[in-house]
Amino acid sequence: METVVLVLQIVIALGIANVWLVRSSKSTAYRGGSATNMKEEFAVYGLSEGVMKLIGAAKLLLAAALIVGIWVPQLIQPAAIGMAVLMVGAVSMHAKVKDPLLKSLPATAMLAMSAIVAIFV
């Protein structure tokens, strides 16, 4: 299980980095409502650009903590729990705007992976 947790830490961290650093200005099939970028997506949810930046910073910080956790294991569980909480929020936002289930699939997968890491670390 230790290897599974390690792989999930890396997958979560790289996935978050991809979404927030590489693809934030790009359209994807998973954006809320009819949004074509991250800023529009947060607007669809009724959230400000400031909230978007705060959430992005928190997710990137937690992703970094999951990577650093490879060498500092005490960081893993708090980072995974924090990420899971943020992913509950992401799934909730998709539900709030009545998105089809497919749109919340990445957030749901990240939530599940974060929960597995938090439980089995």
Image (cartoon, helix red, strand yellow):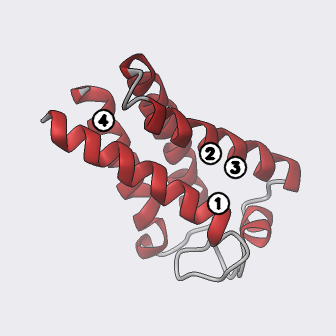
Q: Nearer the viewer, mark 2 or mark 4?
A: 2
Secondary element at image label 2: helix
Q: Quadrant of the C terminus?
A: top left
Which one is nearer the viewer's eye here, 55 or 44?
A: 55
Q: Which structural element holds mark 4?
A: helix
Q: Are marks 2 and 1 in contact (CB under 8 Å)?
A: yes
Disc 2 to disc 3: CB gap under 8 Å: yes
Lower sequence index among marks 3 and 1: 1
Above or below, 66 against 8 in this view is: above
Residue at label 2?
60
Q: Residues within 10 Å of mark 1 (few under 14, many from 20)?
A: some
Mark 3 is surrounded, within 10 Å at the Cα level, by few (under 14), some (14 to 19) or many (20 or more) other residues, namely some
Residue sitting at x 24%, y 38%? 5
Measured in 3D between alpha carbons, the distance from the residue under mark 2 to the one under mark 3, in whole angstroms, is 6 Å
> Is 92 displayed left or right of 46 in the figure?
left
Q: Is residue 44 left or right of residue 112?
A: right
Q: Earlier in the sequence, mark 2 or mark 4?
A: 2
CA separation, marks 1 and 4?
A: 21 Å
Mark 4 touches mark 3? (CB < 8 Å): no
Q: Residue furthest top?
A: 74
Q: Amino acid at mark 1?
A: Trp
Identify residue type, mark 3. Gly
Separation of disc 4 and disc 3 at Cα?
Answer: 21 Å
The residue beneath circle 3 is 56
- Residue at the disc numbered 4: 117
Residue farthest to the left? 1
Say which element carries label 3: helix
